[in-house]
Image (cartoon, grey):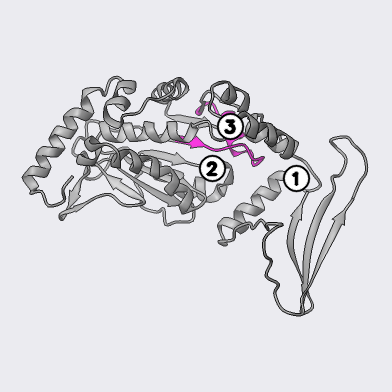
Amino acid sequence: MNDRMTRSQRLEAQNVAEREIMRFADDRVLWFKHVLGIDIDPIQAVKMDLMDEHQFTVDYSCRRTRKTSAKELYNLFKLATEPDHELNIVAPRVDQAKDNIKYHLDGIRNSPILSAYIDYENGRRQIGQQNYRFANRSAARAFGIMSKLDGLNTTIADVEEADDLPDDRLWNIYMPTLGGTEQLFAKNRENKHPPVARFTGVLKGNELLAKLTRNPKFHLLPIVDVHLGLEMGLLARDWYDLQKQEMPRDDYLRQLCCVITESRNFIWERYIRAAMKRGGIMQGLEPTVIDPLGHFEPLGVDSVVCFGWDAGGHGESDHASRYALEVVEHFRGKTYWRYGRE
């Protein structure tokens, strides 16, 4: 839409866009075809119908089976067709939340109807890399879990990569923003929005998603594991055959087969995940994987790099210790752990 249009022309375009948005508001499949020009697959349609029926949902389907796209397209539909929503997407890091809101932004930019429906304030379109607002005052924003979340008035809580989120920040800071019953400047006060929460992620042994499935308030959406994803043509069979050979057994069961199991090695997986969340997210650290064929920069000219082979136990059973490669660097009287591969 041309930013040089007059205010009256913008209002007329928004009215036309709203009429087209509401034309198929009672038939979501036709709505996506008409407004976005896309076809949603049957499992996405089923998940959206269940999200209509349940306020709080959990989905830990296999990676690349379109669980996030189903959730975000559903949220985009709700914001476009219902006024005064505030969708706040939260993820371990801002970049991950921006990946989620990108589904919305791509849909808006590729749809002349939704593009014309973007709100204006002081002559500026209300759309950016991390937020947007429609003419019906429904808005969406993306945050990292360590962002400033106080003061939000959330009507739809969108939680991504739930098993990687620190529990204290999630339940003590973010989720309480969902409890309001009305918004201060909402024009349609008779249409109060009940609190809605959508949790997605993959099982990583931290137990948050597993705990939510045992909570009667949360409804588990249909799980698409790697086998169903292959049968539906959503996944490349050759690649996932390789994943089955290369991934650790527990990770393959959790992340691809969607089986709730816990890895209890010498250091339990749950404590490793907790340490990664507190040290990585709260301190701004990120894990680094060294490329065996890449170039390694030593700490100094007099540093010594040592490779160690840990053959801690013997046996062929699943309970026997596994071999591991470890790389450390000695520099100025200190030892730095560089890399480890089980």
Read off the residue under disc 1. 268
Looking at the picture, tell me which residue is in the foreground, 51 or 153: 51
Does residue 214 sit above or below 266 in this rendering? above
Does residue 341 sit above or below 283 in this rendering? above
Residue at the image point whose x is 69% and y is 35% from the top? 242
- Residue 332 in percent (x, y) is at 76, 79
Label 1 sits on what residue type?
Trp
Q: Nearer the viewer, mark 2 or mark 1?
A: 2
Q: Is residue 101 magenta?
A: no
Label 2 crowding class (10 Å Cα cut-off): few <14, some 14-19, many 20+? many
| Label 2 secondary element | loop
Q: Which residues are magenta?
A: 198-218
First in sequence, mark 3 or 2: give its number: 3
Q: Quadrant of residue 80?
A: top left
Q: Nearer the viewer, mark 3 or mark 1?
A: 3
Read off the residue under disc 3. 62
Left or right: residue 183 versus residue 313 is left
Does residue 83 sit above or below 292 in this rendering? above
Label 2 sits on what residue type?
Glu
First in sequence, mark 3 or 1: give its number: 3
Q: Can you say which quadrant of the picture contains the N terminus?
A: top left
Label 1 crowding class (10 Å Cα cut-off): few <14, some 14-19, many 20+? few
Label 3 sits on what residue type?
Cys
Looking at the picture, tell me which residue is in the foreground, 24 or 141: 24
Gap between marks 2 and 1 measured at Cα: 20 Å
